[in-house]
Amino acid sequence: MASMHQEQLLQKIRELIEPVLRARQIDLVDIACHFGSGRTIIRCLVDTARGIKLDELSSANRVIGVLLDEHDLIPERYLLEVSSPGLDRPLKKTADFERVIGRRIRVVTSVPIDGRQEHVGELLGANEEAIVLKLDSGDKLQILLPQIAHAVQEIELK
C-alpha cells in the first residue's frame, strides 16, 4: 500500500500534468511512484482515444518532465517513464470500463464479495457507481467502483 506521502505526491503530480495532457487530447491513464536505490521513479501511462503514437509519447514525456522540474515536486533525483498502457491497461475510470463492455475482465476487489476477491467474467455494464459482470457460472455480479482494487481486460491469445 502506498504511503500518505506517496499518495499526496501522486495527487499533486496528477493535478499538475492532467490539464496540460488533456489540452493535447492525451489521457493520463495511471500514475505510479516507486522509491528505491536512491532514486524515485515516476511512471505515467498515457493514451488517446485512437491509441498513442511514439511521437506523442515523446512529446508527453518532455512536457511532463518540464512541468515536474519547473514545480520542483520531487526534490531528489528521479527517473520519468512515460509509456502506453498496452493491451493489459488498468481499468480505473467509468470510461475505461465502458470501453470494454462485452469483453472479459479480471477484477480484484479490496474486500471479499461472495467469499472471493478475484472475479473474472464478461463486463455487461458500467456506470459511475458500479460494474456488472457475467461470471463463467452464468451468475451476474455487481461490484461497486470503490470496492475495485485492480481491474484489467483479459487478453485471449489464439
Image (cartoon, grey):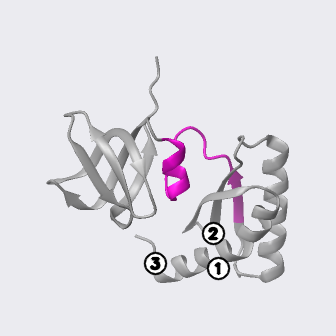
Q: Along the polypeptide, which appears first: circle 2 or circle 1?
A: 1
**Mark nearer the viewer, 2 or 1:** 1
Q: Position of residue 121 (x, y in %)?
A: 32, 38
Q: Quadrant of the N terminus?
A: bottom left
Residue 149 x, y percent position in the rendering: 38, 60
Question: Separation of disc 2 and disc 1 at Cα?
Answer: 15 Å
Three-letter code for the amino acid on which mark 2 is drawn? Thr
Q: Point out residue 153 in the picture as x, y percentages from the top left corner.
A: 46, 40
Position of residue 61 relative to residue 73, above or below, is above
Whether the magenta-drawn stretch holds residue 80 is answered as yes
Magenta span contains residue 152: no
Does residue 112 appear left or right of residue 124 in this picture?
Answer: left
**Secondary structure under the numbered disc 2 in the rendered image:** strand
Q: Which residue is mark 3?
A: 3
Whether residue 114 is visible to the viewer of this picture, yes or no, is: yes
Q: How many marks?
A: 3
Residue interval drawn in magenta? 79-100
* Residue shown at 82% from the left, 48% from the top: 56
Which residue position holds label 1? 12
Q: What residue is pinned by disc 2? A: 40
Nearer the N terminus, badge 3 or badge 2?
3
